[in-house]
Image: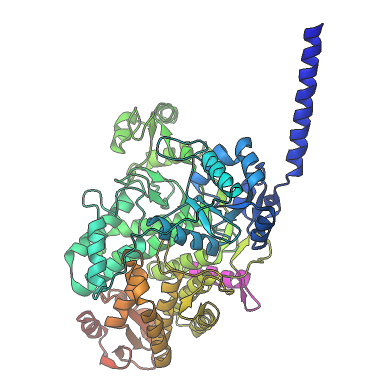
Amino acid sequence: MKKIFLQQIILFIFLIDFSFASSTTKEIANELAKEDSFYLKQHSTNSIFWQPFHENLFNKAKKQNKLIFLSIGYSTCHWCHEMNKESFSDTEVARILNKHYISIKVDKEELPQIDFKYQEKYREFKNENGGWPLTVILNHKKQIVFLGTYLPKNSLIEIVGLIETLQKYAKQNEKNSLKILKKSNQNIKKTISNHEEAFVKTMLERYDEKFHGFDKQNKFPLTSHLNFLFDLYLLNKDETLKTIVLNTSKTLINNALQDHIQGGFYRYSVNQNFTFPHFEKMLYTQAELLALFYRLYLNTKDKTYLKAIKNTIAFTNNYLSNEQNLFYSAVDAKEKYYLYDYEKLYSFLGENEFEDIEEELEKIAFDEFGNLSNNLNLVKKEILNKDLKALLKKFREKENFPFIDKKIITSWNAMMISSLFKVSTLDKNYLKQAINALDSLLKNLYVKNTLYHQKIEDKTPLQEALLEEYVFLSEALINAFLKTYENKYLDLAKKLSFFVNENFYKDKTWFYDKEKNYKAYFSDRHYSSPISIHLNNLYSIANLNYDLKLLESTKIKIQEQKQKILNDISRAPNALRLFTKIKHQDVILKTNKNNLLKNKKLIETIKYPYLLTQVENTKNYLACDERTCFYYDIDLNKVIESIDKL
């Protein structure tokens, strides 16, 4: 009897405790469910009292004597998903955060200025690049006490876990013994007389001669770096630089960084030899690689690049485009979708009456034990057997396609549109698509002279544009002008660029936002630095309009930043590229509009890297620099020859 009574008491206590826990959970209403961001919604069911970023939260932290836990990521980020599953869905982590911290979730694609700020802080404090998820602990004064990326829930041999980290700083805060993080002392000020030699020296040190690309792991395409190295090859005829660029680009195409089944490029390689990609596919990756491959195709006529261009455009059209001719932002890193179980695939091919299975699978390096691990295989090179490729696609599609983030981000769309204009000489359909996409972008995200950062499907855009929106849209408009010679594009590019000068620049400093709360930087990270692209845009606009005043002011603006850029020389190739462009000068090829349009293919064979084209009412072809026209002839080939001698 006593035993039954004791069991009833235990059950009663358990039910009370469960009821209390349930009511507590209900009281902690997660605020992310109300947000538009796909990434924030992914965390809306966490028991953590997440809140979207707002400056008032720092005042709240002060009043409650709590720290700020700031977590930055995005919807298709693999390690963000892992940290969510392991830690942010865990009740113990939620209990600690809810008790001691104000927890803030930031979608880095929605608020890139916040991400840029703390990624730059990470590099300043740690003397290395950060990444996502980015984990920041701050006090109410916005002083940083901890910076990290992915943290396991519990500590490992070499990594302090999230729970231990949270408990450590919460305890310090209670005892008023918080220590503010100090910057790395490894950043030594440099003065470099020749930025080109310094950049090349740095990149040669980073170059992987065996497997190509740069650095040893987490190898990104580094498109901006390859573009500048190719400029220097064209200017100086340094065959070593040409070899580096071509070998690296071929490796990106021929190894596992390209999806050889459905097209498109993954974001980076986890390992050194480009055989194990991180499976995200970002719109900006496709855009920047398209432009690079087109340059290389024009200079080499190697059809490897042409095929990669066509496959990449087909991928974006098949999986990232919408009915409004705009582009979604990314495809998630669903590793399971891209890997093949050898035994299951073997059975599937047999069921579909495919012949010579073992021999054909061996040709693409598939192995019964797996060419990665645990019986799993990845397509690491081009599949020449069309029937096998079709069946591999069919087998893959038995699994649900990875999540597509359907945000329409203005800057990323503009990057893709720029590249479509650049490659449009290959196919008139690319030009048509570029024009339609640009018109749609302006219609949907440049409303009543207000530019917006992003749009989610049919919803009205609300978040006004940041620096990068104005900059990359201006670049797209300049490229539209250079393919159509419609002055409306150049006029709008000039208008938007002047708006940037007036609203994102103060006291020799560039800012990511109009309120000037977040400094912008020259580092070309996951894609090109918007400041560098903006100054390149201004330089082009000045030369296309022969605006010497604008040309001079742009040169002054870039010179103001010279020491900042040289202190970080390996990370700012687009800024360095402008120094080189100023030294060598743009060349403007001028003739009548009909001549320019009918001779596009021939004009694009010009080797000189800094070429613009502009309409002039003459039958002759004129080659001009910033202040003079130095050669003219009725024969375009002779003019091209004079330019290529520069």
**Relative horizontal placement of residue 451, taking residue 349 as reference (left or right):** right
Residue at 69% across / 50% down in the picture? Answer: 33
The front one of 185 and 335 is 185
Q: Name the quadrant containing residue 125.
A: bottom left
Residue at 35% across / 88% down in the picture? Answer: 591
Magenta includes 434? yes
* Residue 23 image offset from top left, x and y in percent: 78, 37
**Relative horizontal placement of residue 154, taking residue 307 as reference (left or right):** right
Q: Which residues are magenta?
A: 432-452
**Against 620, is 98 above or below?**
above
- Magenta residues, dominant SS class: helix
The front one of 167 and 612 is 167
* Residue 513 image offset from top left, x and y in percent: 56, 71
Query: Which color mode does the image show?
Result: rainbow
Q: Is residue 73 visible?
A: no
* Residue 519 image offset from top left, x and y in percent: 50, 70
Q: Quadrant of the N terminus?
A: top right
**Against 13, is 163 above or below?**
below
Magenta includes 57? no
**Relative horizontal placement of residue 172, taking residue 30 as reference (left or right):** left
Residue at 62% across / 63% down in the picture? Answer: 455
Q: Name the quadrant containing residue 568.
A: bottom left
**Against 406, is 421 above or below?**
below
**Against 631, is 533 above or below?**
above
- The tally of labels here is 0
Q: Is residue 639 visible?
A: yes
The front one of 361 and 619 is 361
* Residue 618 image offset from top left, x and y in percent: 35, 93
